[in-house]
Amino acid sequence: MYTVGLCECNGPNWSGALCDQCAADHFGASCLPRLPPPTLAFVTAPRYSGADIMISWQYDVLANSTCTVSTPESTFPVACNHSVTLDNLDSQGHYTLYVQASNKYGNAAQYRHTWYVDHSDPVLQFISTPAPSINSRSVLFRVRCSDSTPCKVNCSLQLAHQPTAYHDCGESYSSSNLADGEYLYSAYAVDAVGNTGHALSYRFTVDTVPPVVSSVPNITIRCGESYFLPAVQTPTYTDNMDDNPQISFSDRSAGNCQTQRTWTVRDAAGNVGQRNQTIFMRAVDSLKVNAFSQMYIACSEAEKLNAASYVISFLNVTSLCGRYLTVNAANQPRVTECGVTLSRSWIITDDCGNQVHFP
């Protein structure tokens, strides 16, 4: 008969050990020795799986296993020893394997492993792409993969007429030294258990060649004649890829009653071609000042009297021929206080040499 207690074991194998029960003779010892429960270490324990999974483990001592599986829908026992194989796991979600490990003395411990069963295909979406037409030889694509498990993104960037060549490129992919031409970027994702999503694709064109703009003849006009579209001729222009590039112009004074017009043609990629044209004007009328000799100005605007553009507007100076005007406003003394009467004289000049003194 055994006696429960904490007696010391005396014997060839257990000398000095604590015991759970005293015994007259236990393999030459005077007690049943106290042994810890088996220690389990998982050998194969995936964090993710599809419909099938195999989980294995090992013990530090000889032990028996009793296994239970918890699914998103139910809990059930399964046969196991040092491994368990499950198949046809139809429900997506978290699963847990519980392993009850016990040794021959009845000491036991429970271990568990949780994993995720994934049946959904990963979904890719674009975060950033180049413009449909670019004049840069470098591009950057960024995509986002949405899935319950980690994704691997494979992509291909080839000229549109070439076959795709997929490789692991991650969610951010850049390329440089691209030649001119039309390109196709394609990408698809594979999740941790092998589910494959639908491919994304994006076409864009690399164009570094500017539009060709033909020369346009210089013209001479009389004051009052229109030199804006559609009264004047525009240059002809072509582009190697864009069938409808945009044309615009900007004017500046070239002095001597001349306007230099710069025609600018911009294609869809942002390449620019330009041509200059000189417009001569003759029979230019004199300037008109439409202001009174005595005027009032708010204190808050007094400092603007040294700005030519403000003075031209303030004095309502007009050139009937639309010429470029200058005024000697900057040469006037600055206004430093309010509530005073100022005496100012201005000289307004156009780029044809016409001049008017005011007042």
Image: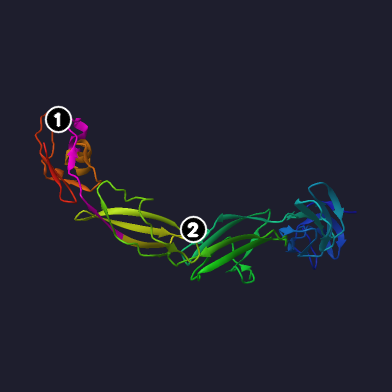
Q: Tell me the amino acid under the disc marked 2.
A: Asn
Question: Which quadrant holds residue 253?
Answer: bottom left
Secondary element type, mark 1: loop
Q: Image quadrant for the N terminus?
A: bottom right
- Drawn side of residue 105 relative to residue 60, left or right: right
Query: As displayed, is residue 17 above or below residue 335?
Result: below
Q: Residues within 10 Å of mark 2 (few under 14, many from 20)?
A: few
Q: Tell me the amino acid under the disc marked 1.
A: Cys
Q: Please, which residue is most extreme toward the top here?
A: 339
Residue 105 shows in the view:
no
Question: Which quadrant holds residue 51?
Answer: bottom right
Give how far across and how far down residue 256 sits, in percent.
19, 55
Which residue is located at x 21 percent, y 53 percent? Answer: 257
- Drawn side of residue 301 relative to residue 180, left or right: left
Which label number is shown at residue 338? 1
Location of mark 2 (residue): 244
Q: How is the image coloured?
A: rainbow
Give how far across and how far down residue 323 sits, in percent.
23, 48
Q: Magenta residues, as a range?
A: 277-304
Which residue is located at x 65 percent, y 61 percent? Answer: 188
